[in-house]
Structure formats: C-alpha cells, structure tokens
Amino acid sequence: MTDSSRWHQVIIDARVFPLEVVLKATYWMTGRFDVDLRLDAASDNVVVAIAGLDGPLEPHLSREVEIRLRRDLIDFRTRAVIEAETRTLREILVAKAFDDDGDA
C-alpha cells in the first residue's frame, strides 16, 4: 500500500474474525478490486485495504464494498462455527455410510 489516498481501509478485529475468515470474505473482491491484507499483531487487527483496479474507489462504492465485506465476514464466521460444531456428527455419518458390516 504505497499510496494511502488510493486505498479504502477496513479494520477487522482478528479475535472476532480469524485471518482464514477474512481471506474467504475478501476472495470474492479480487476479481473487481485490488485487495491488500495486513496483520497488525500489536493490535490483533487485520487491515483490509481496497482500491479499484484503475484507482481509488468512489465514495459511494467504498461504503457499498465495506457493507458487503462486513456481511461476508459474518457469513463465513458463522459457517466456521457451524462446521466446528457439527464436525463430530459428520464424521460419524461418514463412518456409518462406509461401514461394510452395517453394524457400526
């Protein structure tokens, strides 16, 4: 991020949204925007910087992109929670599905 006037920055608390979640939430943006991620270990924040492919974002687009990013962060964090909470059940179901004896 050499020219800070080009970038719209969004600060994400990494204690709430781990880096893996931030990566998933920002991936969709890379086709339309230039995206840069920085981890600020001192503050436990991830700095997401977003710019247009040809320059700065228009102010109305900056707000729209930030709203979408925050919605996607919640979406992917919720998916991660559900995946963690249902992991054991899914493992049991897969084991039953592949049990040749049928008595597991």
Image (cartoon, rainbow, N blue to C red):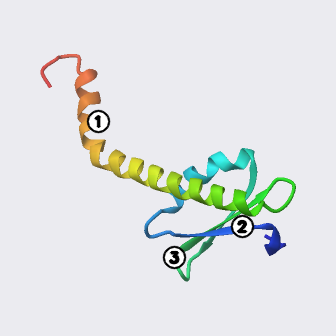
Find the residue positioned furthest to the left: 103
Foreground residue, 97 or 73?
Answer: 73
Q: Nearer the viewer, mark 3 or mark 1?
A: 3
Find the residue positioned furthest to the front: 60
**Residues under labels 3 and 1: Cα distance?**
32 Å
Which corner quadrant holds the N terminus?
bottom right
Question: Looking at the picture, does residue 75 appear above or below residue 11?
Answer: above
* Neighbourhood count class around disc 1 (C-alpha, 10 Å): few under 14, some 14–19, many 20 upward: few
Left or right of 42 on screen, residue 86: left
Q: Which residue is drawn at 65% across and 61% down?
A: 63
Question: Mark 3 and mark 2 in contact (Cβ < 8 Å)?
Answer: no
User: Which three-letter amino acid code belongs to the residue tagged 2?
Assistant: His
Return the x and y of residue 18 as percentages of the image width and height: 48, 62
Left or right of 41 on screen, residue 77: left
Asked which secondary structure carries label 2, the reply is strand
Q: Residue 90 carries which label?
A: 1
Return the x and y of residue 80 as percentages of the image width and height: 40, 50
Residue with the mark numbered 3:
44
Q: Which of marks 2 and 3 is in front?
A: 2
* Neighbourhood count class around disc 2 (C-alpha, 10 Å): few under 14, some 14–19, many 20 upward: many
**Residues under labels 1 and 2: Cα distance?**
40 Å
User: Which three-letter amino acid code belongs to the residue tagged 3?
Assistant: Asp
Return the x and y of residue 58 as percentages of the image width and height: 78, 60
Question: Looking at the picture, does residue 19 appear above or below residue 96?
Answer: below
**Residues under labels 2 and 3: Cα distance?**
19 Å
Residue with the mark numbered 2:
8
Foreground residue, 60 or 55?
Answer: 60
Asked which secondary structure carries label 1, the reply is helix
Q: Which residue is drawn at 87% across and 55% down?
A: 54
Asked which secondary structure carries label 3, the reply is loop
